[in-house]
Image (tube, rainbow, N blue to C red):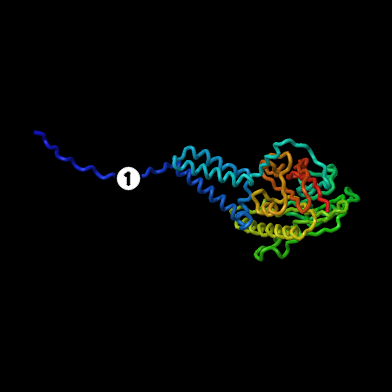
Amino acid sequence: MTAIREPGPAPAPATDSPRRRWCWGTRLVVAAATAWSAFLLAHLLLTGEVWWWSIVELIPPIALAVPPIVLALAAIGAARGVRWRVELIAAATAVIVAPMLGINPAALLADGGAAEADLSVYSWNTDYWHTEGGDTPEAFYDHLLAQDVDVYLLQEYLTGIDWVEPIDDEAALRAHFAGWHIAIASELVTVSRYPIVEQRALDTTGLIGPDDPGAPVEDDWDAYWTTKILRTDVDVDGRIVSLYNVHFSVPVPTFGPSPLDGEFWDSVRGQYQRRAAQVEVLVEDLAANPHPVLVAGDFNSTSLSGAVTALRARLDCPDPDGEPFPVSWPRIRFGLPALWRLDWACAGGGATVADYRFAASAGLSDHDAQHIHLNLEDR
């Protein structure tokens, strides 16, 4: 007789296994990827649009290469399901920031030397003319004359210790450049071997917001704050070329109140309004100008700045030849490495840059100078 086996208890219904939680390392990687993506999106939307983003625009552009690299490396240790997403974010943001980094891969190619051109220009922030750092007038003018160019676009024609003040060095300037054509407006000087047929200071009075106090109360040199662009039209063998000598206002106060002081942020807002007005008046003048143009000088702006973005949208703003990582400031003082490119040259309207180089300032300025050679289309 076969025993009948009693059925055992029914198996318990299957239940979903609990979802595996991310480890703290994965959470940190995801948080970093999210924060970096949000920052980059904010930069694309806010640069040049709101005054407080001016602080972010001061970051050395090369620093934006760090987050994608760190994320790509950190993704290796993240949870498997998260890893590819973080790697995708790292790759996508690397592509987005690549044009902002200020790297010039073309400089790795063979450098053929200076090219023949129709017009040679030397643009330079002189750093308080010859009144700073033990400079002498003789060394200053000898340096300028040694450049042997057709046009000089010079900024910071001024003096001062605690505050900027006008300088009157016109007699010495004309003595050293006898027979040349000279235009002076505010702190800007243009010296041309070719005749200056028209000159115009692009003044921003009336364009600055109503809440801006204008020149600080300590300063009665209004032109320093309202005239940061000097346009000179020069006759180059029958062709008129417009040269814009530019020194945009600094985004933040370099001396004075601490960022913990409300006065500092008031100054940042005021400087943003001044810079926005300067870019506006320049863009408007360029739009109405039928001549070939060169815009050059100390923009006090990196490749992250809205000012550079606005000009790049309208003109060709090349990288200097022979400079894989072009930087122009600070060359002396402050104890900082030279990580910023603040000096730019942009051409258009029939003017093209044939050769463009940064040049050392022989210890006379904290800015490198710009040697620009232009070709002009026949009209």
Residue type at mark 1?
A: Asp
Q: Tell me what residue is drawn at x 73 percent, y 54 percent.
A: 163
Compared to 266, does 318 lie above or below?
Answer: above
Extreme residue toward the top, this view: 1
Please state which of residues 41 and 329 is positioned toward the viewer in this rendering: 41
Residue 185, position as x, y percentages in the image:
80, 57
Q: How many marks?
A: 1
Compared to 175, does 78 lie above or below?
Answer: above
Is residue 82 visible in the rendered image? The answer is: yes
Extreme residue toward the front, this view: 1
Which quadrant, please, contains the N terminus? top left
State left or right for residue 259 relative to residue 137. left
Please state which of residues 288 and 360 is positioned toward the viewer in this rendering: 288
Q: Tell me what residue is drawn at x 74 percent, y 44 percent.
A: 368
Number of residues whose C-alpha sits closer than 10 Å to that of mark 1, classed few (under 14), some (14–19) or many (20 or more) = few
SS of the residue under disc 1: loop
Residue 332, position as x, y percentages in the image:
72, 42
Question: Hey, which quadrant is residue 197 in on the image?
Answer: bottom right
Extreme residue toward the right, this view: 179
Residue 14, position as x, y percentages in the image:
28, 44
Please state which of residues 378 and 156 is positioned toward the viewer in this rendering: 378
Task: Tell me the residue that label 1 is attached to.
Answer: 16
Which quadrant, please, contains the C terminus? bottom right
Is residue 133 visible in the rendered image? The answer is: no
State left or right for residue 379 relative to residue 336. right
